[in-house]
Structures are given as structure tokens and as C-alpha cells.
Image (cartoon, grey):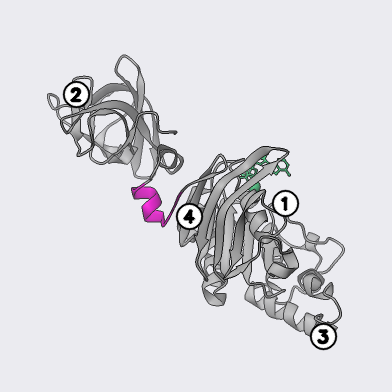
Amino acid sequence: MDIKVRNIRKEFDRYPALHDVSLDIRSGELIALLGPSGSGKTTLLRLIAGLEFPTAGQIFFGAEDASEKSVQERNVGFMFQHYALFKHMTVAENIGFGLSVRDRATRPGKAEIRRRASELLDLVQLSGLEKRYPNQLSGGQRQRVALARALAIEPRVLLLDEPFGALDAKVRKDLRRWLRELHDKIGLTTIFVTHDQEEALELADRVVVMSQGRIEQVGSADDIYDRPSTPFVFSFIGQSNRLPVDVRGGEIRHGDIVLGRTAEADGRWNLYMRPHDLDLVDAGAPGLTGTVSLSRRAGGSRISEFEFGPERHRIEVELPADRGGEPGTELRVRPRRWQLYREGAAA
Ligand SMILES: Nc1ncnc2c1ncn2[C@@H]1O[C@H](COP(=O)(O)OP(=O)(O)OP(=O)(O)O)[C@@H](O)[C@H]1O
Ligand SMILES: [Mg+2]
């Protein structure tokens, strides 16, 4: 099922939580909504589900305008941020719940519901736990039961809000891989919300980066990481350094220092650089220089920080651990890769 979100605006008591959001989701895609707290991720997901209705704009499911349709009519499966299993129901009853509350005409028989529940338990790799109660399961098992419950109604679309929110890093990683495999196997259109960039970039076909009720960029992990379209996306994804520069006649200058060349027009810009895209240069060569004040070890590299220039810009450099960068030593670096954004572009 492909989904088209067209110029959606959503206000809560006149406060706009989403401004003019448009998004095309292809059938069978696994999409991540990524952004800081309050950026509108849950609101967008709830609008797609039919749990909220837009102040303006439309949502299409295939060719059909679903904007006014109810959750049931849209036939979406969802699992929300503060999801909870029904404590007084067994695992099988939890999974079968959505089917057992259907009206008589479409409700499957009890035996059929049980059969489907155990089929779904196989799918989420929890066979044999039908009779357990939620408090007899681990956190990761509960999440998978919640997912099985969302799948039980055979939805056209699966919507997951921070599905692995409360779990430890190792379990999250396992469940992530498992969700990807499950998605590929059943081929549903899936939209999940996360504020964990690693989770979004690793798991999704495309990532939608949101900030303050707007979409900043939609793209693959490579697009988002290597070609961030706004300073916000650049700084939100991974580590970054920012330095105000002047472009004059193709040269990128900070004061007297020429840092590189560009085809961009003359004027004031901001230069954004990743710590691992800075190289050490020899004394005498143009570069950013300073005495390392802090450093930390990150696997095989060392991330060192120094202040640069009279405005004390903070520069973070990532170097192989054996190339120096300990506190108190001097570093001289130059960017190998960067992005330029016009001064005044929102970060
Ligand atoms: N029911 C509501 N009534 C009033 N304001 C709301 C309501 N739901 C959300 N908001 C506001 O809309 C904005 C977006 O909220 P939303 O829950 O979509 O953010 P989010 O990106 O999911 O954040 P988080 O990562 O913290 O879950 C926030 O400023 C929030 O306070
Ligand atoms: Mg949310």
C-alpha cells in the first residue's frame, strides 16, 4: 500500500505541531521518522493511523483519500510509544484481541483466532508462550508480542512508534535485525518512529528527518549522511564542527586561512565538517591550529577537542589513536570534506 501525505498541517489549540508536511511512501518500504523530541514524529504517525485528523491537507492510501477515514477503515496495525499489553490476558489473548473485538460478520471463530495467534508467535519467534501472562515475559519478548498483536489484524500498513524504546542496546540491536527480516518476509509498508539515528540509518530504506514540525530531508542513509540538505541535518546526524567562513573568488577563507576551494558564490557561509574528515597538516601549511584541551578514546580512534581563533570556535578531530591528539599537544588540521551552508540557514 503506498501512502501519500499531502500538505498536512496539524494544530493543537492553535499551536502548530506540523506545518505543511508532504511525503510519499512507496508500497513495501520501511521508513523511519527521525527527529528530536517534540519534532512531530508521533503526531505524523497518529495522523497516518487515523488516530488524529489533520487541520489541513490530505492523506491517501493508494488512490483512496483516507483523510476522513477511521482507524478500522484504514486497516493499519500499530504499536505506540507507551504500548502496553493487557496484563490480565495471556499472550495468545493479547495477540488475538484485535480479531476478537471485530463485529460478528468479520470476526473469525475462536479456534481460528487461536490458530492465527500461534502462527504469529512462530513469526516473532516466541512459539510455546501462548499461555504466559505479560509479567512472565522479558521486555524484548513483550515488544515482540505487541508487534504480533499489531500484525494479527492483517494490516495494510504497520506503524510503530519507538518500538524498541525501553530496551537495552544489545536487545535493541537484535530486535532491529529481526524487524528488518520480518519486514522483508511479509512485505508490508512499515513506518517506524525513532530518535535514535543509528537505528534509523541502519534499519530503514529511507529516513525522514524532522525538526520543529517540518520535514528537513528524506533520503537513504547515504543521502542523509553524505549529502545533508540543511545544517540541521548535518549537525543532527553524527558529530560536526561549524566554522563561519567567507567565500571569495572560489576560495573558502576563515580570516587569512584558506581552507579549500568551492564553486559556490562569494559571500558569508558556514563550513560544516565531520571530526573524521579533518586531516593533520604540516606546520607552515594553512590549517586550523590549537592545543588539545580534551580527548577521549573511541575504539581505534581518539577524538580530540581544541579551541581555535579569537572567537574560540570549538573544533573536534577524530584521528587514529596512534597519531597523537592527547591533551596538551598541538594539532594543525584541514578539512578534506565539508558542506557549505549560507549564513543564516537554520541549524
Ligand atoms: N494532544 C496534544 N495536545 C497538544 N499538543 C500536543 C499534543 N500532541 C502533541 N502535541 C505537541 O505537538 C508537538 C509534537 O509532538 P509529538 O508528540 O509529535 O513529538 P515527537 O517528535 O513524537 O516527540 P518525542 O520524541 O518526544 O516522542 C509537541 O510540541 C507536543 O507538545
Ligand atoms: Mg513521540
- CB of mark 3 within 8 Å of CB of mark 4? no
Q: CA distance from mark 3 to mark 1?
A: 30 Å
Coordinates of residue 149 in the picture (x, y in percent):
72, 69
- Name the residue that disc number 3 marks: 111
Q: Which residues are magenta?
A: 217-227
Residue 229 in magenta stretch = no
Seen in the picture, residue 102 relative to 25 is either above or below; the reply is below
Residue 175 in view here: no
Disc with the residue nearer the chain's start (3 vs 4):
3
Say the numbered circle drawn on residue 82. Answer: 1
- Quick one: SS at disc 2? strand
In the displayed structure, does residue 192 sit left or right of residue 276? right
Can you say which quadrant of the picture contains the C terminus? top left
Seen in the picture, residue 292 relative to 107 is either above or below; the reply is above
- Most foreground residue, 338 or 51: 51
Q: Would you call the spot at circle 3 few (<14 residues within 10 Å), some (14-19), or many (20 or more)?
A: few
Name the amino acid type tagged 2. Answer: Ile
Which of label 3 and label 2 is nearer to you?
A: 2
Residue 225 in magenta stretch = yes
Q: CA distance from mark 3 to mark 4?
A: 40 Å
- Quick one: SS at disc 4? strand
- Most foreground residue, 11 or 154: 11
